[in-house]
Image (spheres, rainbow, N blue to C red):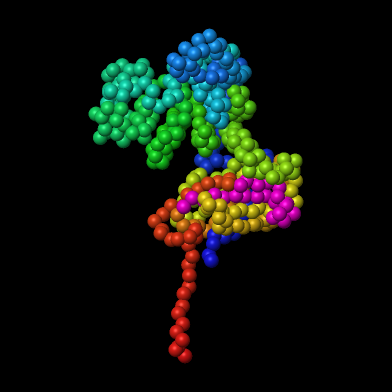
Amino acid sequence: MNIPTPLPIASIGLQASDSIQAPGEGSVRDFSSSPVVIRAEGLSKDFEIPEYRIDSLKERAVHPFRKQETRILHALEDVSFEVRQGEFFGIAGRNGSGKSTLLKILASIYTRDGGSLKVAGQLAPFIELGVGFNPELDAAQNIVLNGVMMGLTRQQAEAKVEKVLDFAELHDFSELKIKNFSSGMLVRLAFSTMLEADVDILLIDEVLAVGDAAFVQKCNDAFRDMKESGKTVVLVTHDMESIENLCDRAMLLDNGRMTKIGDPGEVGREYMRLNFAEAADDHDSWVPSDQRAATMLGAWLEDADGKRVSNLAEEEVIRAVVEFEMRSTVEGPLFTGMIANVDMVHIAAWEQPVLRDGQPIEKLEAGERVAVVTEIENNLVPGRYNGSFRLCRNENADDVAMQMIGAVDFVVYGTSSSHGVVRIEPRQSTRFENDE
């Protein structure tokens, strides 16, 4: 049977002091001499959360004097940072880390419980796209309404309608009430309206969470235009590729505290380390923690252009990237992988030494950061699959130093009606008994 096998491609070992440069990264812009437009010192915010909810009149009538017990959620604790004029500043963090709370304090939607905040210049928040739209008005009317809310005169706002509709590609729907818009159409209208804001500072929260791939690319191009034009932008996102490609600096929040600030690449890697820490414990539980020689930083699939993907066309080469940081030295490092389908049928497995410049290396040292790249011929039929990976010691696939079961999930799509899980390419001949 012809099953997927690895193509001969080198694994890449990166020293801990090396940077893993994101696509599109270039020279670092220096803002040290630019004036500070946002200065936050010791910002704190608490919320009082009920331990239980009373959802009916019956509950209230039966227990009229029950005291409502609450707990305190520390959404932000002692967060300090500065943003300078013209800087593209990213804020990253897992769900519940305090990102949106911080942005709402910057926008004066929430009051702070502690610390100080100074903002120089006119500021426009875009925290939830579509907020402020009137569902009973059509697209053109809402563009004018939002323009006036942003400080434009009615004439200035009306002059921007055509430009907004052009970018959003919604000319055919300009007279349709937006209550009848799809979520994708609403995102396009809201983002396009945001681009016309003539303000000093933009606060943007997860604007690309919805939308088709073509419009997401269009938005990324618009962000780059903002960056080149010197706009000051504070961007909250879960997309580390956007953080690394767009931002001049970034900050990481975790459980309401700032844990890292500075280089976007370093912030992105720390974010991935936090995300994979719990997953590593779940999927690596049979390897005792004191024997794990490396910490998983991330695992993903890439297309031919180096962009992260979660689905592949039939016969499109599978390119898997696994990034980890060494905790201790591993002699004779061996990297193995396995592909399985949703029924956990093992379809393909491989093992290769870790290479540097095409040659096997003797050991990986503690502190080294490594990205292993594996390309695999794709003979999989359409369906859902997952990939698992191991780093092993002493050239022995049974001596496991780190593993991640189900590190990546992906879909192979296409029109093939083949049965089974892999395509085969048979060579067939026929013999007849009466042939001489």
In the shown orientation, is residue 192 left or right of residue 111? left
Residue farthest toward the front in the current orientation of the protein: 62
Q: Is residue 96 above or below residue 119?
A: below
Image: magenta residue range = 383-405
**Viewer-proximal residue among 113 and 163:** 113
**Viewer-proximal residue among 22 and 330:** 330
Q: Position of residue 324 (x, y in %)?
A: 64, 43
**Viewer-proximal residue among 53 and 419:** 53
Q: Is residue 50 above or below residue 378?
A: above
Q: Position of residue 47 (x, y in %)?
A: 55, 17
Q: Is residue 424 magenta?
A: no
Q: Residue at position x 52%, y 21% from top?
A: 101
- The part of the image, by quadrant, that contains residue 268 is top right
Question: Is any atom of residue 200 visible in this view?
Answer: no
Q: Residue at position x 24%, y 29% from top?
A: 175
Question: Is any atom of residue 429 visible in this view?
Answer: yes
Residue farthest toward the top in the current orientation of the protein: 65
What number of labels is visible?
A: 0
Q: Position of residue 21 (x, y in %)?
A: 58, 41
Q: Residue at position x 45%, y 54% from top?
A: 382
Q: Is residue 393 magenta?
A: yes
Q: Residue at position x 64%, y 57% from top?
A: 351
Q: Main secondary structure of the magenta part?
A: strand
Q: Position of residue 5 (x, y in %)?
A: 57, 60
**Viewer-proximal residue among 236 and 53:** 53
